[in-house]
Image: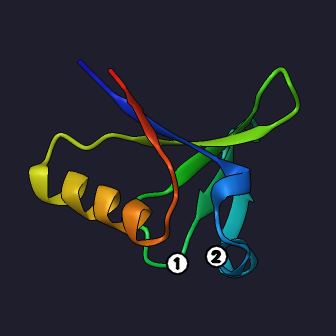
Amino acid sequence: MSAHVYIQYADVPDLLIASSRQRIDDNGSVKLISLDGCPLVGQIDELSNGRLQVEFPWPRAVELRGALSNWLTYHGINFTVVM
């Protein structure tokens, strides 16, 4: 089973957005975002209502999963895990 974490792009603090690195993947179809201190790279998706969300894989490794949830909590970013 795989799980994913979803956050709203608008919930990411402006300073993190300003220092982020965004790029299109090698296939040219997916926009990726790296945020300072975040242990994973996220995928930016546009929802049907025009809002942007960022999707991260929810790691199976406890240490990496803890690092991601701690990073999100530290920055006050609400997140949803979907299994």
40 with respect to 47 (left or right): left
Can residue 80 be seen in this snapshot? yes
45 with respect to 75 (left or right): right
Q: What residue type is labelled 1?
A: Asp
Which residue lies at the image location 41% right of the left edge and 58% below the top edge? 40
Of residues 20 and 25, the one nearer the viewer is: 20
Q: In which quarter of the image is the C terminus?
A: top left
Q: What's the CA distance linking mark 1 and mark 2?
A: 7 Å
Q: Name the residue under label 1.
A: 36
Which residue lies at the image location 75% right of the left edge and 79% below the top edge? 18
Q: Name the residue under label 2.
A: 16
Residue 37 higher or lower than 52, as above or below? below
Of residues 25 and 73, the one nearer the viewer is: 73
Q: How crowded is mark 2: few (under 14 residues within 10 Å), some or many (20 or more)?
A: some
Of residues 67 and 32, the one nearer the viewer is: 67
The kind of secondary structure element at disc 2 is helix
Can residue 24 be seen in this snapshot? no
Q: What residue type is labelled 2?
A: Leu
Residue 58 higher or lower than 49, as above or below? below
Q: Quadrant of the N terminus?
A: top left
Q: How crowded is mark 1: few (under 14 residues within 10 Å), some or many (20 or more)?
A: some
Which badge, 1 or 2, is on the more N-terminal residue?
2
Q: Position of residue 32 (x, y in %)?
A: 64, 52
